[in-house]
Image (spheres, grey):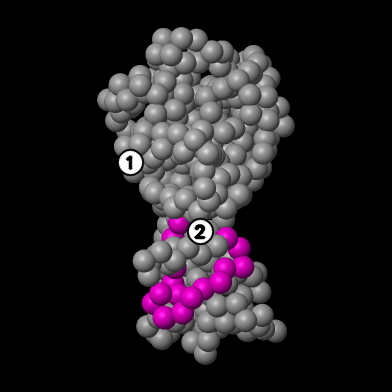
């Protein structure tokens, strides 16, 4: 699973990526600062299963924060920061299709938008409030849809050579053409059903049918949430309200990536205690006047006003609300400790509707192939291969090891 961090140059996209991953990338206010995609690891928050058993987990990947006897586990997810998109990228403008191709394997997108309206469509600085962020939201969706449409058009003759009446074969032909951008057969089928194109032969599809189909494929295969960045600027509140009214179907989260980055760096230097998603911090060292003023501004204009910086909320929302993944822990009825003494060391994020057999294959191919049964460690109940799993399950897989 990969989450793409996208947006025009100077929107705060790379600052968002750095604040989520604490990776130093070139952060500057000019186009094409990041030509090669930057990959990193961010984290999403889940309720740790250790509390149920009265134990303290020590994750092999990620980390645990226990505040007020409420253990929260930060589970790693892969993020990719792609160079800034400009209008016309699908036609080769800016650095062209390379940006879009870098996004091809993303499962969802966080679109970082400059809510202050202080950068134009190309990412150049303009007077604050003079650019409409709604235009940025539209342009990214349209660029991706036009990119998908171009792939469909380029493959249409080849697809039409097999004018299948069989519904499943029709889906397979189209999905094959779009496989390179991680559009799956179920995305294609959902788009066709939504647009009521099931009974139309492929050669009967109009240009409008294809355009709408490309749009639905984008919605289903690359769902987007909006990180309304620079939310602490005066004009941003009005712009965020307008974005929510203009795009009621989108999740729009006020965000201050610069504030998150400052807090994360200060925490890394042990200046203060702060974890991603917190709406507060604890000062650990004596601060100079400049530091005091900066930290007080973040506290007043961001943490108190928006209940956090919004960066962690964006990550949690895209994984759990947009993609509908949920956490499952491997464990055993005879113990929760691995051979190295780690308590509940692993946590996996599974797609919606995952079953016991899916979890077995997630752990290891041999476990899936040799699956005998599974055990719900919390209830001690034996469950079968088709048993649906749920948030926070701790599961033991019994399998044939030969």
Crowding at label 1, few (<14), some or many (≥20) Cα neighbours within 10 Å? Answer: few
Instruction: Measuring from the top left, give residue 219's x and y in whole percent.
Output: 44, 35
Which residue occupies 61% across, 49% down? Answer: 269
Magenta stretch: give its range.
44-62
Which residue occupies 64% across, 14% down? Answer: 93
Is 54 colored magenta in this rendering? yes
Identify the secondary structure beneath mark 1. helix
Instruction: Measuring from the top left, give residue 151's x and y in whole percent.
Output: 60, 27
Mark nearer the viewer, 1 or 2: 1
Which residue was labeled with disc 1? 304
**Outermost residue, bottom side:** 334
Residue 343 seen by the camera: yes
Which residue was labeled with disc 2? 74
Which residue occupies 57% across, 38% down? Answer: 17
Crowding at label 2, few (<14), some or many (≥20) Cα neighbours within 10 Å? Answer: many
Which residue occupies 53% across, 39% down? Answer: 288
The correct choice, above or below, for 289 with respect to 35 in the image is: below
């Amino acid at each position: 699973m990969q989450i793409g961090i996208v947006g025009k140059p100077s929107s705060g996209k790379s600052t968002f990526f750095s604040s989520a991953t604490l990776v130093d990338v070139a952060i500057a206010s000019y186009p094409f600062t990041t030509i090669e995609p930057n990959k990193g690891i961010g984290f999403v928050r889940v309720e740790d299963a250790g509390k149920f058993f009265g134990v303290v987990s020590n994750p092999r990947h990620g980390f645990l924060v226990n505040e007020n006897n409420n253990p929260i586990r930060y589970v790693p997810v892969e993020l990719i920061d792609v160079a800034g998109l400009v209008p016309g990228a699908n036609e080769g403008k800016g650095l062209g299709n390379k940006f879009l191709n870098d996004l091809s394997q993303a499962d969802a997108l966080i679109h970082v938008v400059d809510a202050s309206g202080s950068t134009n469509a190309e990412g150049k600085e303009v007077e604050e409030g003079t650019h409409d962020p709604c235009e940025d939201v539209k342009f990214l969706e349209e660029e991706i849809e036009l990119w998908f449409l171009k792939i469909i058009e380029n493959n249409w003759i080849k697809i039409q050579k097999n004018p299948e009446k069989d519904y499943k074969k029709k889906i397979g032909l189209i999905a094959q053409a779009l496989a390179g951008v991680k559009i799956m057969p179920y995305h294609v089928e959902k788009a066709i059903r939504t647009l009521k194109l099931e009974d139309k032969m492929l050669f009967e599809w109009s240009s409008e049918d294809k355009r709408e189909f490309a749009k639905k494929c984008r919605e289903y295969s690359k769902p987007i949430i909006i990180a309304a960045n620079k939310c602490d600027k005066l004009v941003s509140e009005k712009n965020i309200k307008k974005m929510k009214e203009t795009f009621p179907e989108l999740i729009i989260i006020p965000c201050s990536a610069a504030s998150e980055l400052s807090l994360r760096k200060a925490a890394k230097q042990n200046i203060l205690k702060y974890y991603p998603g917190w709406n507060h911090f604890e000062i650990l060292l004596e601060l100079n006047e400049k530091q005091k003023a900066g930290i007080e501004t973040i506290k007043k204009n961001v943490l108190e006003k928006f209940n956090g910086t919004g960066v962690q909320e964006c990550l949690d929302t895209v994984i759990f609300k947009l993609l509908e993944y949920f956490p499952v822990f491997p464990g055993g009825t005879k113990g929760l400790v691995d051979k190295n003494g780690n308590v509940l060391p692993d946590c996996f994020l599974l797609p919606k509707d995952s079953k016991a057999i899916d979890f077995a294959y997630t752990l290891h191919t041999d476990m899936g192939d040799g699956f005998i049964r599974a055990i719900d460690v919390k209830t001690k109940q034996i469950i079968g291969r088709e048993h649906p799993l749920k948030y926070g399950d701790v599961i033991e897989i019994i399998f044939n090891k030969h």
